[in-house]
């Protein structure tokens, strides 16, 4: 932190070396500078001015130093210094160059990108060299913010270089029988400078396309700047790689990123077809450990013994509360932290993979943190076999996926809840399903759903699960003024130990039920209490946080569903009343949607035309008219929809094909919230009939 002191006149009397470094000016030039009259940035000057009013000031943003002209991004705090009598003695300023923090964040992101690339390369150990090389140079381009790149691997036997490029512009110029572009080492031109110098070469100058090597076929790209590095193995150049056309100049940080990435790639290529994968993994250990400490992925090396003793684990195992030595000392083996309910399944998975000769496999299971919290992990495991085909070690990466599992669970449950009303089940079955969804939460094994009487405010059970009849009878009903109801009317979920609830039940002792923990969840819709849920656990002393999140998410959905059920019940009642009214009419009535599909017919139409509801439901309304009258029907409807007419005397036709003369009136209406066209037809009786 840079620190300055200034007096009551605004003159700087002292600054530390850090402040001098930040603003880019010597101390002697800073001392005596006036923060009142000489600051050229209005916002910064305002932050200083308030100090002379006895208040602290703050500034954050880009600033160009009035002393040195240096451009920087800073965060500064200014504080007044007061005498005992309240008079101002001056002020203190503390300044931080936050541009460095941003660069540090960028470096961390680059390190994580490189780690992901290295891990992907390890998973590509069975891939062709071409795929490994093209992936490596693609990542090299991304890590350095370049536009293009290439990788050339030395073939010592033929003294040629195999060239891989990204984006791959070479492949279209190769003959069909060739997959890789080859050229002699001697023709590498300025690209080969890194080979001759045996060190990285950074060139931040412009090259015209006509000055590029003629080695490469196809269109040449102008080179604004580029960087080339040799890849060394046992002090020998084995490959050369380069990237080009970064927007800014290349520097040593680009060299570091390329070197670490390409050294990792070369080690994979070098040991691709050998049995020295373990040796290579251990050689990469220091590189991986430095990066893995800030990564969510934890690397393990296990012995193929019972419950997998650990030979190596990365430092970031600390995210689960353990330290590396817990495992390396043998105090804990990996099987000790796998959830007991999942341990046998994990054992069987590893055994099956080993017997069937898998090179890698993955599985999801739960582990226990040192504090006892349950976390879900995704394990990706590689098995290494000795010459006799026996597994001699396992290499694995585990990633915490608890949040993803919970998010997927939330989405699945919300989708399932949304489909509850789409089924034809009665109210009782609907509440049974709602309770089943609520019991999706881990550690919850029992519950009761209550509906609230909107008039009296009493609570009545409508569904229960996992509880004895006598226990449910004791809690089946309670009034609006009871102690139990007050647990819900707070408006917030309440989580209790069961013995606390048992004490509240003064008239009964419910210990026989064997519950350990309970939850009282109000179910609201539009801030009104519409239902309530009591949940219990016979095994857990308290309901864990992740289960609480799931319970409360489901409760929100239950409130919406109950309100929809009440609304749909009212709509259905209104619809039934309307059906009864239509059936009482002597006129023939049919209702169709805007696309002409029949939604409803009344009893008079069924009697007169001998159709059943099943015959006409969702059928084209033109079925009710003679075939040779269809054009007239459609023309008449066009006039009706345009408002030119509302009646028609086109006859209807019965199921047997008999014409029935009618006079029809059409009107637009609403049917269960849907725009429809309603036709009411009066039969025209012949004279004397």
Image (cartoon, helix red, strand yellow):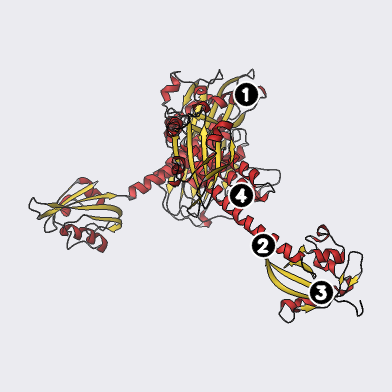
* Dot 1 alpha-carbon crowd within 10 angstroms: few under 14, some 14 to 19, many 20 or more: few
Tag 3, which secondary structure? strand
State the residue lying farthest toward the front: 507
Mark with earlier residue (3, 4): 4
Per the image, label 2 sits on a secondary structure element best described as loop
Vertical order, 142 against 343 (above or below) = below
Earlier-in-chain disc, 3 versus 1: 1
Residue 530 on image: x %, y %? 52, 50
Q: Name the residue under label 3.
A: 682
Q: In which quarter of the image is residue 253?
A: top left
Label 1 SS: helix
Q: Name the residue under label 1.
A: 348
Residue name at image x 25 percent, y 64 percent: 42
Q: Locate residue 140 relative to residue 664 in the image: left or right.
A: left
Task: Residue under label 4, please give it.
Answer: 418
Rendered location of residue 581, percent (x, y): 73, 65
The structure residue drawn at horizontal position 17% and vertical position 63%, both measured from the top left corner, is 37
- Label 3, label 4: how far apart the Cα atoms are: 43 Å
The residue shown at (68%, 43%) is 178
Q: Position of residue 265 (x, y in %)?
A: 53, 36
Q: Can residue 162 be seen in this view?
A: no
Q: How crowded is mark 2: few (under 14 residues within 10 Å), some or many (20 or more)?
A: few
Instruction: Write down the residue under mark 2.
Output: 672
* 329 versus 621 height, above or below: above
Cα separation, mark 2 vs mark 3, equals 25 Å
In contact (CB < 8 Å): disc 2 and disc 1: no
Q: Work out how far the residue at label 1 is from the one at label 4, CA to CA, in angstroms.
A: 37 Å
């Amino acid at each position: 932190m840079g620190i300055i002191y200034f007096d009551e006149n605004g003159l700087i009397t002292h600054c530390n070396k850090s402040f001098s470094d930040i603003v880019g000016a010597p101390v002697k030039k800073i001392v005596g500078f006036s923060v009142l009259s000489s600051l050229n940035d209005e916002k910064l000057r305002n932050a200083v001015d308030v100090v002379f009013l006895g208040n602290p000031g703050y500034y954050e943003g880009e600033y160009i130093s009035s002393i040195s002209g240096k451009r920087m991004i800073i965060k500064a705090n200014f504080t007044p210094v007061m005498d005992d009598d309240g008079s101002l003695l001056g002020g203190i300023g503390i300044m931080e160059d936050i541009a460095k923090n941003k660069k540090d964040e960028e470096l961390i992101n680059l390190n994580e990108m490189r780690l992901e690339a290295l891990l992907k390369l390890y998973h590509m150990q069975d891939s062709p060299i071409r795929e490994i090389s093209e992936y490596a140079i693609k990542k090299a381009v991304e890590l350095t913010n370049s536009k293009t790149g290439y990788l050339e691997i030395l073939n010592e036997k033929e003294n040629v270089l195999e060239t891989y490029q990204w984006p791959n512009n070479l492949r279209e110029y190769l003959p069909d029988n060739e997959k890789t572009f080859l050229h002699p080492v001697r023709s590498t031109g300025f690209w080969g400078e890194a080979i001759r110098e045996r060190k990285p070469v950074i060139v931040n100058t412009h090259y015209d396309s006509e000055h590029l090597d003629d080695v490469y076929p196809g269109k040449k790209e102008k080179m604004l700047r580029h960087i080339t590095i040799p890849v060394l193995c046992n002090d020998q150049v084995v490959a050369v790689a380069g990237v080009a056309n970064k927007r800014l100049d290349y520097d040593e940080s680009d060299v570091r990123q390329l070197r670490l990435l390409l050294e990792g790639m070369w080690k994979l290529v070098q040991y691709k077809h050998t049995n020295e994968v373990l040796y290579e993994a251990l050689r990469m250990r220091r590189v991986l450990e430095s990066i893995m400490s800030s990564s969510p992925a934890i690397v393990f090396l296990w012995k193929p013994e019972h419950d997998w003793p650990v030979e190596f684990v990365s430092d970031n195992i600390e995210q689960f509360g353990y330290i590396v030595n817990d495992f390396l000392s043998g105090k804990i083996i990996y099987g000790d932290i796998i959830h007991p309910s999942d341990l046998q399944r994990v054992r069987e998975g590893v055994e099956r993979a080993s017997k069937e000769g898998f090179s890698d496999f993955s599985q999801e299971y739960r582990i226990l943190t040192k504090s006892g919290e349950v976390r879900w992990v995704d394990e990706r495991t590689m098995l290494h076999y000795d010459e006799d085909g026996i597994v001699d070690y396992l290499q694995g990466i585990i990633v915490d996926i608890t949040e993803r599992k919970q998010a997927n669970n939330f989405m699945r449950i919300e989708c399932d809840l949304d489909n509850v009303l789409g089924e034809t089940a009665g109210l009782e079955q609907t509440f049974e399903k709602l309770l089943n969804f609520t019991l999706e939460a881990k550690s919850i094994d029992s519950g009761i759903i209550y509906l609230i009487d909107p008039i009296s405010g009493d609570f009545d059970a409508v569904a229960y699960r996992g509880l004895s009849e006598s226990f449910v009878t004791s809690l089946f009903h309670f009034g609006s003024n009871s102690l139990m109801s007050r647990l819900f009317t707070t408006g917030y979920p309440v989580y209790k130990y069961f013995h606390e609830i048992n004490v509240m039940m003064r008239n009964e002792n419910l210990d026989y039920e064997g519950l350990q923990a309970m939850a009282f969840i109000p179910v609201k819709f539009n801030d009104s209490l519409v239902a309530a849920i009591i949940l219990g656990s016979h095994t857990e002393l308290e309901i864990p946080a992740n289960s609480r999140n799931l319970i409360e998410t489901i409760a929100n959905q239950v409130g919406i569903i109950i309100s929809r059920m009440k609304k749909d019940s009212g709509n259905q009642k209104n619809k039934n009343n309307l059906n009864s009214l239509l059936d009482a009419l002597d006129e023939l009535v049919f209702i169709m949607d805007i696309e002409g599909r029949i939604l409803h017919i009344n009893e008079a139409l069924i009697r007169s035309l001998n159709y059943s509801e099943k015959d006409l439901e969702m059928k084209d309304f033109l079925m009710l008219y003679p075939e040779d009258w269809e054009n007239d029907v459609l023309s008449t409807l066009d006039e009706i929809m345009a408002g030119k007419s509302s009646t028609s005397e086109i006859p209807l036709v019965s199921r047997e094909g008999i014409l029935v003369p009618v006079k029809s009136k059409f009107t637009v209406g609403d049917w269960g919230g849907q725009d429809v066209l309603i036709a009411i037809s009066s039969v025209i009786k012949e004279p004397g009939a």
